[in-house]
Amino acid sequence: MGIIALGAAVAVLTGAGAGIGIGLATAKATESIAKQPEAKSDIRTSLIIGCALAEATAVYGFVTALLIIIMLGSK
């Protein structure tokens, strides 16, 4: 059971990576808007698309962890 928990923990680590990535992207987008206010809508659109992709990665990691626990943990 220990190796299964380790595998699930590694899969869930994608959530930490996504959180760091979204935080860095938001910081850079805010900095860019401060430097070029006229490009606000373009920057915001790119930020939202990037955050959605990063969040999807975190969800995939969570689902993978659940599948590892459900499929392999029942043996």
Image (spheres, rainbow, N blue to C red):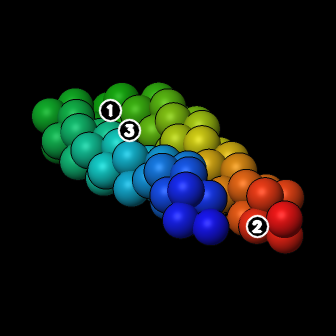
State which quarter of the image contains the N terminus: bottom right
* 5 shown above or below 33: below
Label 1 environment density (alpha carbons within 10 Å; few <14, some 14–19, many ≥20): few
Q: In the rendered structure, which amino acid carries the disc numbered 3?
A: Lys
Q: Residue at x 60, y 42 (%)?
A: 57
Q: Which residue is mark 1?
A: 38
Task: Give me the disc on residue 28.
Answer: none
Q: CA distance from mark 1 to mark 3?
A: 6 Å
- Name the residue beneath numbered marker 2: 73
Residue 16 as seen in the image, left or right of residue 2:
left
- Residue 23 position in % (x across, y down): 30, 52
Question: Where residue 53 sits: x, y (%)?
Answer: 60, 38
Say left or right for 33 vs 63: left
Quick one: SS at disc 3? helix
Q: Residues within 10 Å of mark 2 (few under 14, many from 20)?
A: some
Asked if marks 1 and 3 touch (Cβ < 8 Å), the reply is yes
What residue did someone put label 3 on? 40
The numbered mark, 1 or 2, whose residue comes first in the sequence reads 1
